[in-house]
Image (cartoon, rainbow, N blue to C red):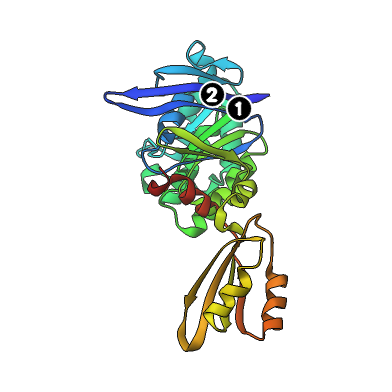
Amino acid sequence: MMMIEVKNLIKRYAGLEAVKGISFEVAQGEIVGFLGPNGAGKSTTMRILAGFLPATAGTVRVAGFDIFQNSIEVRRRVGYMPEIVPLYTEMTVNEFLNYRARLKGVRGKRVSERIDYVKEVCDLKEAQNRIIGTLSKGFRQRVALADAIVHDPDLLILDEPTIGLDPNQIRQVRELIKSLGQKHTVLISTHILPEVEMTCQRVLIINKGRIEASDSPDNLTRRVRSGGGMKLEVRAAQEMVRQVLSTWDVLEEVVISSLEDGWLQVEAFPKRGDDLREKLFQCVAKEGWGLRELTRHRATLEDVFVELTHEDKL
């Protein structure tokens, strides 16, 4: 079952088309990273999915319900955590979660059951009687996550859930999101790309209102040109190195630059991203060159992001 179905979604503001006819799907149970530079249209798209913002054109279905024709049904199935979380800082954690649960339609004894559950999952028991305004940023993010799941939604939409947190708090929130993914479909936006690689099964990249890529982090990194690049530092004559490597049909490009004391830095890019380290080592040994480094560049999601959204590409 598809939890999210977006087709030809358009959002126009006065004089600006922020989202330009995008289409994508998210299956039930997926944890999907939604990435893009500032102003790319990702927050606008997430607000439309959460029912906080109307679209100009296109269709959006969440859990099988049309978000425009069945807005109330969609909202019941969505837990939304915006980038700037509107918490009531004068309330205690218990008071706030009780208020939010009832506001979201949780009734009867289920209110206390759900509040106990989210306090356990979000590790809020020690803070349950504290005023929210006295809590650290990390605890406030946990309260916001608890609020997002208190009504047991099918879909969680999290916009920058780790913004402003220290590394320890980021790790805690990451583990929490992964655990939530066992029960909920999760769409998460963040600028901390290593978190996406460790958390998400699939990545959507949006740029200037259009979807540029949709794939798993591993498959996306394989597409980056520098992903299989080899880096060597050798002591040899530059022309000799260039002449030898120019005969290799498997190489797309070779870049050679001079270092100190006769050493050269050689960057070799295979056409198919093959691992040529063993072949390069054998070549160096055969030619009698000095060798002090031989490494293969492993592309990251950051490399993918930069390659797809850099201004020079457009």
Residue 227 located left or right of residue 189: right
Which label number is shown at residue 188?
none
Tell me the element at label 2: strand
Task: Give the alpha-carbon distance from disc 2 to disc 1, as whole Å.
Answer: 17 Å
Residue for point 67% across, 80% down? 284
Q: Which quadrant of the figure contains the N terminus?
A: top right
Residue 185 is drawn in which quadrant? top right
Question: Badge 2: few (under 14), some or many (20 or more) residues near its Cα, within 10 Å?
Answer: some
Number of the label disc, if any, that sits on residue 154: 1
- Badge 1 amino acid: Asp
Instruction: Work out whether residue 180 or residue 232 is closer to the camera in this orientation and state it.
Output: 232
Q: Position of residue 182 (x, y in %)?
A: 67, 38
Foreground mark, 2 or 1?
A: 2
Q: Residue furthest bottom?
A: 261
Q: Report the front residue among 280 and 202.
A: 280
Amino acid on which disc 2 is placed: Val
Locate residue 126, reporting x and y percent: 52, 49
Whether residue 181 is visible: yes
Q: Pinpoint residue 12: horizontal percent, then vertical percent.
A: 35, 23
First in sequence, mark 2 or 1: give its number: 2
Relative placement, left or right, of 189 versus 287 is: left
Residue at the (51%, 58%) spot, across then down: 168
Query: Which residue in the protein does label 2 denote?
Result: 6
Q: Is residue 120 visible?
A: no
The foreground one among 135 and 35 is 35
Counting labels gives 2
The quadrant of the picture occupied by the C terminus is top left
